[in-house]
Amino acid sequence: DISFVYLYCAINENHRRDKMRIPENQMKKRVDIVNNELNKELFPSFVKKIDSTNLSDIETLKLILKSNNLI
């Protein structure tokens, strides 16, 4: 089986996370561009969406696993 999960977060959090990347991997202004594009996207119903704004990496992973009945 294949599962699809769309992880998203608030734009301010997205910018904060981007600054944590090494400089050559930072998206900078592209964060807003990609965010706008994804906000327009109509995902099929089989795509699970998880707002990770206030979640740690571990909490996010647990939600992904739980949503796919893996835990």
Image (cartoon, grey):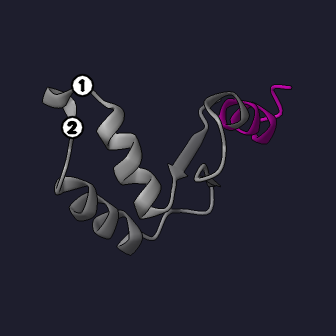
State the residue at coordinates (21%, 37%): 26
Q: Main secondary structure of the magenta part?
A: helix
Given the current orientation, which residue lies at the most extreme bottom position?
Answer: 40
Q: Alpha-carbon neighbours of circle 2 within 10 Å: few (<14), some, or many (≥20)?
A: some
Q: Alpha-carbon neighbours of circle 1 within 10 Å: few (<14), some, or many (≥20)?
A: few
- Counting from the top left corner in percent of width and height, residue 59 is at 72, 35
The kind of secondary structure element at disc 2 is loop
Is 64 magenta? The answer is yes
The kind of secondary structure element at disc 1 is loop
Q: Residue under circle 1?
A: 22
- Counting from the top left corner in percent of width and height, residue 48 is at 64, 52
Q: Contact (CB < 8 A) between labels 2 and 1?
A: yes
Q: Nearer the viewer, residue 18 or 51?
A: 18
Q: Residue under circle 2?
A: 26
Q: Which residues are magenta?
A: 60-71
Quarter the N terminus occupies: top right
Image mark count: 2
